[in-house]
Image (cartoon, grey):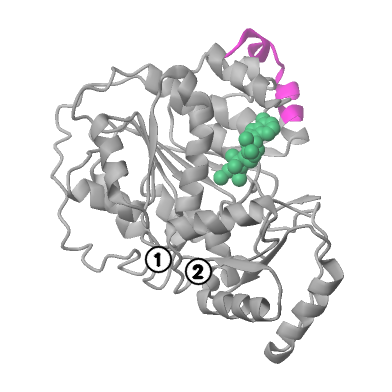
Amino acid sequence: MNRYDHRYADPDSYRQRRRGFDSGRGGGRGGGRGGRHGGHRDDLDNLSLPKQDFGNLVPFEKNFYVESPSIRAMTETEVKMYRARREITVEGHDVPRPIRIFQEANFPDYCLEVIAKLGFVEPTPIQAQGWPMALKGRDLIGIAETGSGKTLSYLLPAFVHVSAQPRLVQGEGPIVLVLAPTRELAVQIQEEALKFGSRAGIRSTCIYGGAPKGPQIRDLRRGVEIVIATPGRLIDMLEAQHTNLRRVTYLVLDEADRMLDMGFEPQIRKIVTQIRPDRQTLYWSATWPREVETLARQFLRNPYKVIIGSLELKANQSINQVVEVVTEAEKYNRLIKLLKEVMDGSRILIFTETKKGCDQVTRQLRMDGWPALSIHGDKNQSERDWVLAEFRSGRSPIMTATDVAARGLGRITVC
Ligand code: ADP
Ligand code: MG
């Protein structure tokens, strides 16, 4: 059994594949990063969000890190050895030491209880180093491979942050804003948030395109401490003044490389103008090409950085990878032959480069009697949800997908 994971052979081909890709309402149709109109909106330049006055800001608390005595007692050599063993590299000034066990992060008891219930044994490396860094209230860039627990790396410090802020009053927007490139990812982040937040009375909601606005507006108007959003739909909500970002003091960009790469930069820029400049900003990503760093730093203040493993892209060791080079004409027959060999009741994911290709392969497979369904950015949310459920349950064991649509399926186990 292997966890589903997808990596990129090299950043350039990865970027090429992004081109022309659309992740739905919030997606980048504008020709990749640098496209002026990265999202679905061609009127982004004309769009006017309410002017914000950040002149007389009331200071807020953002440093919640209390180093535990057991961490203080470590020698420099022990710290070095721990970082080396867990392949943790850090950059920047005043980086706190990593923690080794959950208790050393000083999270509230309910967090530890949920962690115990989930059966987690120890912090993942990004959590071990990322938690103290995030809790200190500084801006940071966290880079670690898919499936390494980045979501909780920012969510648990977010809960601590929220609990220390004045309560929301009627008409106020969220305290924590998490931006994510796709709705699937946004939904998964919220699932993680719900596991912990429900214990602390911290509310969260997901704001993404391709789904009715009504329930999202209702949640926003009722007041939520944490909003997880794709940029396009959030801008719609801000424009219509269903919410505002004046209370946001903790801003997360998840899959930051992908967001910038998918052309979300103009949207992110618009959104950031709505948020107070002394906020804490956290970038999380699996890959970190240099150009993305340059862009990212425009939104960060004196950030530090944690990298787990090597930045060199490498294949996931737990997945057996076989590469075959075939002509376009040979592809389908080769696929069928492969399916006949591997189809044994386990689930199979087939990635295609384009949405059109995805539809074509799926149609052909179905005509030939294979139980295949597809997801990609042109499918509406309810269809995507349904297809995912069919695949997860094994009722439809073959799923075809474009890679960005499938992004965020990290919890699917393929056999
Ligand atoms: P990433 O964002 O880095 O791709 P996720 O945050 O989605 O990874 O986490 C992948 C899975 O690992 C999730 O199911 C999450 O609940 C689980 N997880 C997170 N932290 C731990 C931990 N310390 N030990 C075991 N599993 C964990
Ligand atoms: Mg993630």
Residue 401 visible to an observer of this rendering: no
| Residue 332 position in % (x across, y down) | 71, 83
Q: Horizontal placement of 71 versus 186: left or right? A: right
Whichever of labels 1 and 2 marks the residue nearer the N terminus, that label is 2
Give residue 87's quadrant in the image.
top right
| Residue 362 position in % (x across, y down) | 61, 75
| Residue 217 position in % (x across, y down) | 26, 42
Pick the residue in front: 396 or 181.
Answer: 396
On screen, 153 above or below 231? above
- Quarter of the image with the C terminus in it: bottom right
- The reply to whether callout 1 and callout 2 are in contact (CB within 8 Å) is yes
On screen, 311 above or below 344? above
Q: Which mark is residue 45?
A: none
Residue 241 visible to an observer of this rendering: yes
The tally of labels here is: 2
Element type where label 2 sits in the image = helix
Pick the residue in front: 235 or 281.
Answer: 235
Q: Residue at x 62, y 24 (%)?
A: 97
Q: Residue at x 57, y 70 (%)?
A: 12
Task: Determine which residue is flagged by label 1.
Answer: 28
Cα separation, mark 1 vs mark 2, equals 8 Å
Q: Horizontal placement of 378 versus 247: left or right? A: right
Type of amino acid at the residue the image marks with label 2: Arg
Q: Residue at x 49, y 32 (%)?
A: 193
Q: Is mark 2 within 8 Å of ligand 2?
A: no
Q: Which residues are magenta?
A: 67-82
Task: Determine which residue is flagged by label 2.
Answer: 18
